[in-house]
Image (cartoon, rainbow, N blue to C red):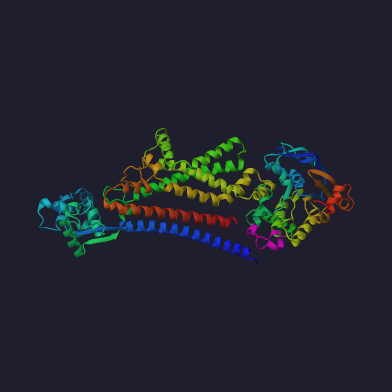
Amino acid sequence: MNNFKKNLLKKRYNAERRFQWYGKIAIGLALTFLAVFMFQIFSKGYSAFQKTWIVTEVHYDKELLLIDAESPSKDDLENADYYDVAYKAMTSLDPGLPEEEDRQLIQMVSYKYETEVKDLLLKNPDFLGKIVPIKLTASDDVDQVHKGNYPRDIPEENRRVNDYQLQIYDMLNERGDILSEFNISFFTNPDSREAELAGIASSFMGTVFSILVCLAFSFPIAVLAAIYLEEFAPKNKFTDFIEVNINNLAAVPSIVFGLLGLGILLAVFNLPRSTPLVGGITLSLMTLPTIIIAARASLKAVPPSIREAALAMGASNMQTTMHHTVPLSMPGTLSGTIIGLAQALGETAPLILIGMVAFVNTIPGTPVDPAASLPVQIYIWSESAERGFVEKVSACIMVLLAFLILMNLAAQIVRHKFEKKWS
Amino acid sequence: MSKIIAENVNVYYGSKQALFDVSINIAEKEVTALIGPSGCGKSTFLRCLNRMNDVIDICRVEGSIKMDDLELNSRKLDVVRLRENVGMVFQKPNPFPKTIYENVAYGPTIHGIAQSKEEMDQIVETSLKKAALWNEVKDRLDEIGTGLSGGQQQRLCIARAISVSPEVILMDEPCSALDPIATAQIEELIDDLKKEVTMVIVTHSMSQAARVSQKTGFFHLGKLIEFGSTEKIFKNPDKQQTQDYITGRFG
C-alpha cells in the first residue's frame, strides 16, 4: 500500500469517527436539556403533592351550634350554625389575643375552614358536645412557609405572613400540630382562587372528555377517508387536490382551528360554550389530517403482493381492503392516531378561543359540562401571582407528562399486540 | 381441445403498446409455457387471462380472449367469478400474514364453497395434500403462513390457488425465487396437477419450460414469435429468432 492510499484510508476512518462524535454530542445535548427541564419541573413541583394542615381543637357546643333538639337529626346538623364553633377553634390557639386581632389567626387557615369543621361533625355525629382535635387546611401562605418556599428574613411589611403569625406557626410546629400529608385534594378538587384548595379534577376530567370526543370524531372519519382515498378513489386532479389540501391542513396553526370552532360550532350550531364536547370537536379538526396522513402511509406500506394475492383469489376490492389491507395497516394507523391525540392533548390555543379557559369550580360529569383542560389549567395558574400556584403549575405539568407517557405506553402495547397477530 | 382462445390481443400501458396481435390457443389439461426475454410481454399476457391488468389504471386490453365461449375481455364479465375459476401463483411467494389454515380456507370462505367446518377442514387438507405440503404442516396449521420457508410458502400459495378447484391456474415465474430443490418439488407438483387443471406458466428457465410443458410460446418485444409443441420449439423451431433465444445467443 502506498502512502497516498494509506492517508486516504486514515482520512476515511477519521471522518467516520468524527461523525460518530457529532452524533454523540447531539444526543448528549438533547439529554442534558431534557434533564434540566425535568429537574426544573420536579424540583419546583414535587412540594405540591404535600399538603399542610393545622391541628387544633374544636368544641361542638350545642348552644353555639344553635341546636335545640335533644337528639338532633342529620338535617339539624346540616342546618346548624358552625360560624362560632369554627371561629373559636382557631382563636383558642392563642386565648390571650385581643378580639380585634382574631383575623390574624383566621387567616392562617383556608377560607373553607368552617366547611371542614362542619364536615367532620356530619361524618361523626357523636362528636356533638365533645371537644375533639381537628385538621384544618393551612392557608396558602402558611403552607409555603412550612415547605420552606417563603423567605422569613424580609421586612415584615413586605411579607404576607406577619411576625405574630410566624410566632404562632413556630409554636404549633414545635408542638407537632403542623401536619404535612399527601395532597389528595390536588387530585379531587376543582380549580379554586385559593392555591391551597385548587386541584386538577376539573381540568383532568375536561382533558379526558375532550380526548375521548376527539377520538370518537376524528378516528372513524380519518380512517374512512384514508381508506377511500388510498384504495378506492380514482387517481385524478380532484383527488390530488384533496391530498394537497389535507397536507396543508396538517400545517395550519392550531389557533385557526380554534377560530373555526368559535365561528361554527359555537356561533352556528350553538353548542354549549366551554365544554369538552366543543373542545374535542375542535381538536379533532386538528387531529384529522395527522391521522389521515398516518393511515394512508401505513396503507401504502402494505405490500402490493398481498392485494394481488387476495384479488387473484377472487376477493372483491372491498374484501381485499377489509380482510387484508386495513388490518395490516392498523398498527401504523393506531400509532398515528396516538401521535395525533398526544398533540391534541397538549393543545391550548384553540381551547382558549372556544372558552375552555373559563374559571370552572365544578367537576364535569359529562362532555357537555363546562370544564378546563390540563394545558389550559397550566396557563391559568401560571398567570396567578400567589406562590402556591407556582408549585401547582409544575405539578400540573407532571400530571400532563404522566398522561402523555401513559398514552404512548398504551399505543405501544396495542401496536405490539396487533403486530404479533399479523406477522 | 382448446380451453382458452386468444385472438388479436393488443395491450397498451397508456400510449405504450405492450402486446401486438397475440393469438394463441391454450389446450385443456396441458401445461403451456410462455418464454421470452424480460419485458417481452409474457406476464402481461398471462395477466389478461384473469383480468389482473384491471388493477393497473392505465392498462387497456383490446381483442378477444375466450374461455369455453366466455368472453374474458368484456366489461360485463364478473371478474370475481372469473378469478374463482382461474387461479394465479405469483413470482414471489405471497401468502397472507395469517395462519396456514386461514390461507387455504380464504378462497372457499369468500366464495361460499364449504358449508360446514368439517367440509372446510376437508378442503384445506385436500388442497395441502395436492400441493404436497400436508405432511410438512399438518401439525402446525395454526402457525403463520409467512413463517414457512420460501419453497413451502410457494406450495402454500399453490394450495391456496387450488382450494377453490379452479379450471385454470396461471403461474408467473413460480420458481424464480426458489432454490433448485424447492424448484424440483414445484415442477413435480405441476406435473401432477395437469391431470385436473389447465396451466399456463411463464418462466425464464428454458430447461423448466422443456421439463414441464407440452406447448411453448416464445414472446419477443410484445409479439408472439412462435407457438407450438414444446418438443418442436426446443428441437426444431421454425423461426431463427426462436432458435437464437433457445440456444442462448440473445436474451
- Residue A193's spot in the image, x, y percent? 27, 47
Q: In the picture shown, does residue B187 fall above or below B170?
A: below
| Relative side of A141 to B128, left or right | left
Residue drawn 56% across and 43% down? A226
Most extreme residue toward the front is: A3
Residue A357 in magenta stretch? no
Viewer-closest of A13 and A311: A13
Quadrant that contains the C terminus of chain A: bottom right
- Residue A262's spot in the image, x, y percent? 40, 36
Q: Quadrant of residue B223?
A: top right
| Relative side of A309 to A155, left or right | right
Does residue A53 appear anywhere in the picture? yes
Does residue A70 appear anywhere in the picture? no
| Relative side of A415 to B93, left or right | left
Most extreme residue toward the bottom is: A1
- Residue B152's spot in the image, x, y percent? 70, 59
Q: In the picture shown, does residue A259 fall above or below A421?
A: above
Q: Magenta residues, as a range? A: B133-150
